[in-house]
Amino acid sequence: MTLRLLISISLFALVMQRVSAQSADDFFHTGAQAYLTNNTTLAKEQVDKGLKQFPDDIKLKKLDELLKQQQNQQQQQQQQNQSQQNQSQSKQDQQKQNQQQQQQQQKQKQDEEQKKQQQPQKEQQKDQGKQADEQKQKEQQTPSGQMTPDEAKQLLDSQKNDEALLPNNRDQKHDRDHPLKDW
């Protein structure tokens, strides 16, 4: 009776072991379903467990390679995204720098134009000031009611330009009869 009991217990343990144990196909199917539903972490866990128990199973090895390829592709895509973000950020930074440089150049041009505009004004003011000083000195040097030699020359030149030359028509009869009057 003990022998019978021992045999039945061992058969029961063997059946339970078979029921609880998964085959390589079970690990593969569970991993494949997880992969198809984009649950790569569960798929990787199932494949790793299956490969521990069944290291020579071809289906599990292929699924493992597929998961690794997908992981590499995701990493490459993330790296590309980061590099694109870095490039766009550097372009934005460069554009900002260019804008700042342009603003500085415009500001410098405006400053230079203002200086150029201010210089003639300052020179005109200086010239006007010098002329006023010269006139004051001349007025102080000449007594009132008298002209300076420069003023006299200017007056004579202005009158000289206003004079009209008289025509030389002495050959005509009516000119001989009437003498020319110059007053």
Image: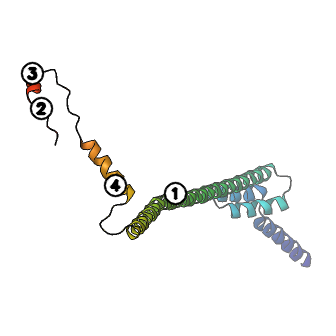
Task: Kindly identify which residue carries mark 1.
Answer: 109
As helix, strand or loop, the secondary structure at mark 1 comes to helix
**Can you name the residue that lies furthest to the bottom here?**
2
In the image, residue 161 above or below residue 167: below
Local crowd at mark 1 within 10 Å, few (<14), some, or many (≥20)? few
Q: Earlier in the sequence, mark 4 or mark 3?
A: 4
Local crowd at mark 2 within 10 Å, few (<14), some, or many (≥20)? few
Task: Kindly identify which residue carries mark 3.
Answer: 173
Give the spatial CA distance, label 1 vs label 2. Answer: 72 Å
Looking at the picture, how far across and down is residue 158, in whole percent? 29, 48
Q: Look at the image and tell me in which quarter the C terminus lies.
A: top left
Q: Which residue is drawn at 83% across and 71% down?
A: 13
> Is there CB contact under 8 Å for labels 4 and 2?
no
As helix, strand or loop, the secondary structure at mark 3 comes to helix
In the image, residue 123 above or below residue 158: below
Looking at the picture, how far across and down is residue 182, in whole percent? 17, 39
Local crowd at mark 3 within 10 Å, few (<14), some, or many (≥20)? few
Give the spatial CA distance, label 3 vs label 1. Answer: 75 Å
Looking at the picture, how far across and down is residue 121, in whole percent? 43, 62
Task: Kindly identify which residue carries mark 4.
Answer: 152
Left or right of residue 172, residue 71 in this image: right
Left or right of residue 16, residue 96 in this image: left
Query: Which label sits in the foreground, 1 or 4?
Result: 4
